[in-house]
Amino acid sequence: MTRFAQRALAPVALMLALCGAGAQAATLKIACSGLGKELELCKGAADAWGKKTGNTVEVVSTPNDASERLALYQQVLASGSDKIDVFQVEMNQVGLLANQLLDLTGYSKGVEKGHFPSMVNNSAVGGRLVAMPWFIDAGLLYYRKDLLEKYKQDVPQTWDQLKATAQLIQDAERKAGKDKMWGYVWQGRAYEGLTCNALEWVASHGGGTIVDDSGKVTIGNPNAVKAITMAAGFVGTISPTAVLNYAEEESRGPFQNGNAVFMRNWPYAWAAAQAADSPVKDKVGVAVLPRGSGDGARHAATLGGQELAVSKHSKNAALAVELVLYMAGPEVQKERALKGSYNPTIVELYKDADIKKANPFMGSLVRTFSSAVARPTAATGVRYNQVSSEFQNTVHEVLSKTAKPEEAIARLNTRLHQISRGGKW
């Protein structure tokens, strides 16, 4: 075992000693996402910690929709409830919840230094380490290797190429009798997932990041309009109209059932696609998302990730921290990488032979994480949720053809200037 792993598991050994000395067992509650295999893996790791320490951990299921989950967290924490001790928190939610979360600095003993600095920086709010990184994400393009080979098509490097290839294969497959085939599925519901998709479109066209690092609103530009106009052209052609109500699992369904050529999703979808009962097992490839066109065009993937935090209202705070340190430690992160293709936040694990074998694409993602596009959470602070809501709702109006792109983006630009109070977030 590495020295880092030994340090990470030291708190568990301490708890074993305490339990052996007659310490009273406790029951903790952890709120986990049920997306993909998350609930199963969360429960498994929590049960393992409970057996090692003599305590009990109950897993609280939460909504898959990130916005709904955030609303639940805010309600529980704002009420001062002690009913949930540990929360699985999206990285863009950390700043919003920070005042209700326990400072882990005195407990972590520097373990966080082994994680991606970008994730640790996101966890530190006002000099307080309020969460521990659990897994890191970036948007990816999934594609059917067999279909691209069948129709002699390359993996698309631009959005224009993706649309052309998706249309070609979709039409040919339908002509062959597969009437449920679509070219491209993604997350189009008006929620945080659409913010991620739309940010990728805009950034890939050189349209900025909605709000830049200095706090300046940048969305009101021709490249942003071009990007959203492009995406609106997907709906009803290479993407079903139902995509306007798709989140991660709704888009994974048709792709994994063999009814889509391309899919935008997070890394977790790889393990599901490769499952023994998956209709597309061994038929799927993973690539970077396409770039746009024009000045500043680039490949762009929204940076994402999840962290674990302790409620400051927990009656078993010290134990809850020990649970978090175990869950975010190398043993559990490796297990999650092997069983669920969740990308570790511990840099050392990207050298692990088992992880590289199970997830061939994972090693290359280290570079992707370094260049991924971050949502403007740092610049907008506690107003990020409002900024994201305005952005996703505006984009959704354009996608659903109820607003014209130029007019919608202009209104959004004005609205964000109002929210920012002249850039003073």
Image: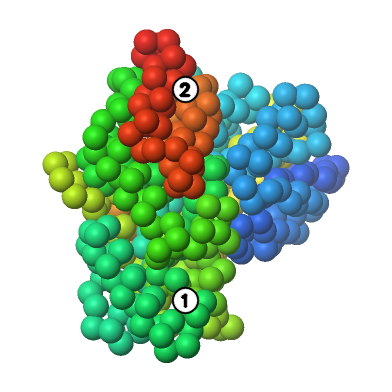
Q: Looking at the picture, does residue 297 appear above or below residue 102?
A: below
For mark 1, what is the residue? Answer: 181
Query: Is residue 44 rendered to the left or right of residue 380?
Result: right
Task: Say which amino acid is labelled 2.
Answer: Gly
Q: At 61% across and 57% down in the image, what residue appears?
A: 35
Residue 196 location, quadrant: top left
Secondary structure under badge 1? Answer: loop
**Placement of 194 over or under 352, stated as above or below:** above
Q: Where is residue 91 in the image (x, y as percent from the top left)?
A: 50, 39
Quarter residue 168 falls in? bottom left
Question: For mark 2, does the 10 Å Cα neighbourhood hold few (<14), some (14 to 19), or many (20 or more) residues?
Answer: some
Q: Is mark 2 on a helix, strand or loop?
A: helix
Viewer-side residue, 368 vs 125: 368
Q: Residue at x 16, y 41 (%)?
A: 296
- Badge 1: few (under 14), some or many (20 or more) residues near its Cα, within 10 Å? many
Residue nearest the viewer, comparing 223 with 374? 223
Name the disc covering residue 274, or none: none
Query: Tag 1: residue type?
Result: Met
Furthest toward the left, the residue is 295
Q: How many circles with numbers are drawn on the protein? A: 2
x, y percentage for residue 167? 33, 71
Along the line of sight, which residue is nearer the eye, 221 or 135? 221
Residue highlighted by disc 2: 381
